[in-house]
Amino acid sequence: MIVSRVHGRLAAVACAVLVGALTTGLPVPAAAASILESVQTQALPNQHVRVVLQFSAPVVIRPVSNGATTTFVMQIAGATMGQSISNVMPINLGALQSINVSPYQGGVNIALSFTSPLRPTVGQGGQTGLYVIDVPPGSSSSRSRRPLRRLPRAPRSRR
């Protein structure tokens, strides 16, 4: 019973503060949006490319693309772009050609462009705001070529 009275009084105080702020023109504190602070890439020895996204707070990354695709799009609701983030980042590491970051009303879209259809995996960052995207190697021209075949030697002429 005491707990319910405390909750009731807290709710009344919160409502009074909110109504007072709205009627006096004072700004009402909004929920802090997570900021995309950095985008880093790294080529790995196994031909994979690691993309590291650093946010100021944890976010939910929702892949929009299903299956293997040449453009993998992720949507991050409630996030904004940091000042040092470019809209278009040419990468050209392994199968990853570029990363495009674009704001939309309510969040940020991040699109990874590949040389061939791929399905990257997104690792969730827990409470740190750090997220790792693993881009597998694409089918490159060197992988699709057959190894050179040895031609038989021509018989030597005897003199």
Image (cartoon, rainbow, N blue to C red):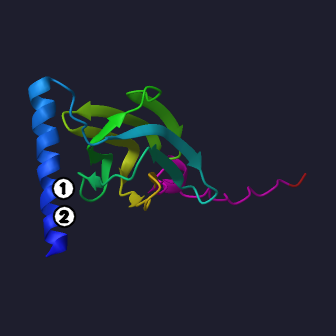
Whole-percent x and y of residue 16?
12, 42
Whole-percent x and y of residue 116?
38, 48
Left/right of residue 5 with respect to residue 146 in the rendered view: left
Magenta stretch: dominant SS?
loop
Whole-percent x and y of residue 133?
44, 54
Left/right of residue 22 with respect to residue 87 in the rendered view: left
Whole-percent x and y of residue 76?
29, 46
Residue 73, placed above or below residue 147? above
Between residues 42 and 146, which one lies in front from this camera angle?
42
- Say which amino acid is labelled 1: Leu
Tag 1, which secondary structure?
Answer: helix
Q: Which span is picked out in magenta?
A: 132-157
- Say which amino acid is labelled 2: Val
Q: Is residue 101 magenta?
A: no
Q: Quadrant of the N terminus?
A: bottom left
Residue 127 picture quarter: bottom left
Tag 2, which secondary structure?
Answer: helix
The label shown at residue 6 is 2
Instruction: Give the residue number, with chain letter if any, for mark 1.
Output: 10
Name the residue located 44 percent from the left edge and 52 percent from the top edge: 129
